[in-house]
Image (cartoon, helix red, strand yellow):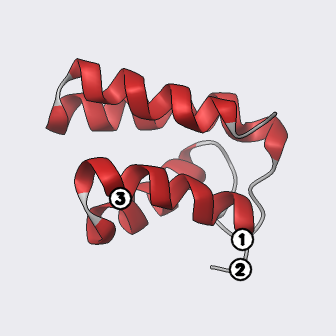
Amino acid sequence: MANPLAQQVEKILAGAVGEFIAKATVKKNCELIGATPDNLSDSQLTDLAAHIEKSVSFFSGKETGLEVAEKIRSLGG
């Protein structure tokens, strides 16, 4: 994954769910918003964060999901 933005999202996620699950989560949730980890853009971060929040909340709790989503949204500047 060469896209620095997607790498940052993955790093945030890895802190909550581990590296392996983070990679899969970024890939799957990018697909859900019509993107790939390689072409993810700032304008897609809000949608991506919403999808990832649901995924993380399901597996790691609502508080963790909200925290991860907020960090992802903040990447957009």
Q: Residue at x 29, y 71 (%)?
A: 20
The disc placed on residue 64 is none
| Closer mark to the observer between disc 2 and disc 1 | 2
Pick the front one: 71 or 29? 71
Of mark 3 and mark 2, the one earlier in the sequence is 2
| Residue receiving disc 3 | 14
Pick the front one: 39 or 9? 9
Q: Residue at x 42, y 34 (%)?
A: 68
Q: Residue at x 32, y 69 (%)?
A: 19
Pick the front one: 74 or 35? 74
Say whether marks 1 and 3 touch (CB < 8 Å). Answer: no
Say whether marks 2 and 1 touch (CB < 8 Å). Answer: yes
Classify mark 3: helix, strand or loop.
Answer: helix
Quadrant of image for the N terminus: bottom right
Q: How many marks?
A: 3
Say whether marks 3 and 2 touch (CB < 8 Å). Answer: no
* Vertical side of 8 occupied by 49: above or below: above
Q: Amino acid at mark 3?
A: Ala
Q: Amino acid at mark 1?
A: Asp
| Closer mark to the observer between disc 3 and disc 2 | 3
The disc placed on residue 2 is 2
Of mark 2 and mark 1, the one earlier in the sequence is 2
Q: Using the numbered discs, state the Cα–Cα distance from disc 2 to disc 1 in whole angstroms.
A: 6 Å
| Residue receiving disc 1 | 38
